[in-house]
Image (tube, rainbow, N blue to C red):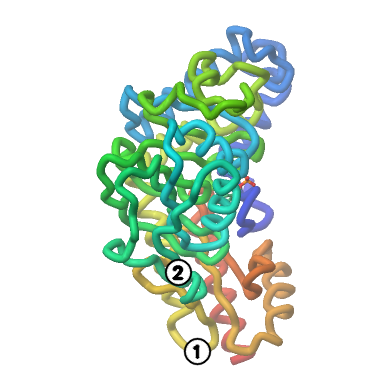
Amino acid sequence: MKQPVFNFSPGPAVLPHAVLEQAQAELLDWQGSGMSVMEMSHRGKEFMSIAAQAEADLRTLMAIPNNYKVLFLQGGAHSQFAMIPMNLARSKQQADYLDTGDWSLKAIEEGKRYLDINVIASSADSHYSTIPPFATWQRNPTAAYLHYTSNETIRGVEFDWIPEVENVPLVVDMSSDILARPIDVSRFGLIYAGAQKNIGPAGLTLVIVREDLLGQVLDGTPSMFNYQIYAETESMYNTPPTYAWYLSGLVFQWLLKQGGLEAMAKLNQRKAEKLYAVIDAGDFYNNPVDPDCRSWMNVPFTLANASLEKRFLDEAAQAGLVTLKGHRLVGGMRASIYNAMPEEGVDALIAFMREFEAKNG
Ligand SMILES: *Cc1c(COP(=O)(O)O)cnc(C)c1O
């Protein structure tokens, strides 16, 4: 069965078709249990095996070292904006944050409720079209941690490098580019990501955290916001989002079958580069982001003639290319091309863009 449309939604986003087919086949009866995964006790042996396999596969995919805990949480990246200062302040008063866009700013605003936030650098002056050079970051060597956003989902700015910070734990919001390429987990104190962009369905939030950072929460931290409690209960302090956990596990297996993150990185780079090439080929389309930090995951673009936008979106949808409208903060278009977007989807978008330009240029 072919995909009915190519869905370029920023999130919740496209899932691998093969994964959805497997979930469908197992929907009413998971592996002879007679139950749907949705109906199972999270403490029963069936679900416990699903949960353990998902964690094992994620550890393989990302080569997660043994001194890191993998937590399967709820509450989205937004909860992490608060959980991080609550858990990682560790008697310090201050944390460093880099400002590269709308998601960085949200993390900064929430962080301010708990700590003094030192904004070490900002690309606001360039309308968030670049990453401030590392040499300009005004870091505090005794900060509780340094927080940054590896992929700004709205404006399409992505790091292809990891900041070199010593003695200060590095904390990263990878909500929209986790699993897009191999990364060295040991460089980080904490990695977090909402599942609904590049992992699985909405409702699950992943946290990968170095063990030695746990156990010193701010006074008054709710149990539900305490990483240590999840670490001690295998993320089953309360009822976890079981179906989203299961489906994410199927995605991990699918990624392993594709050849893991090395293979995904090659594919993601190829998909992104050919799309940027069409945008850059003339004046009809435009992407304002510095070529050094253009995202492989979210490709925003505008039309030189903005009055054609509605026609572009309507005709694209008729051609089966849906959810291409840009974020309300920036307008224009945005193609989100996560791991699960097949290369044929990008090729179909490129063909449409060329044809639309030929007719309207
Ligand atoms: C989508 C997104 C968020 C917000 O995620 P929620 O799960 O809705 O809280 C935060 N950061 C980044 C980079 C995102 O893309």
For label 2, the crowd category at 10 Å Cα-Cα, with few meaning under 14, some 14 to 19 and many 20 or more, is some
Residue 323 placed where, x, y %?
68, 62
The label shown at residue 283 is: 1
341 or 83, which lies in front?
83
Q: Is residue 246 visible?
A: no
Q: Is residue 47 above or below residue 356?
A: above
Q: Residue furthest bottom?
A: 361
Q: Amino acid at mark 1?
A: Asp
Q: At x 74% / y 73%, what residue is drawn?
A: 314
- Which quadrant would the N terminus be assigned to in this image? top right
Q: Is residue 325 left or right of residue 304?
A: right
Q: Amino acid at mark 2?
A: Ser
Q: Does ligand 1 reach within 8 Å of label 1's beta carbon?
A: no
Q: At x 71% / y 67%, what residue is drawn?
A: 317
Q: Is residue 133 above or below residue 221?
A: below
Residue 139 placed where, x, y %?
33, 54
92 or 156, which lies in front?
92
Classify mark 2: helix, strand or loop: loop
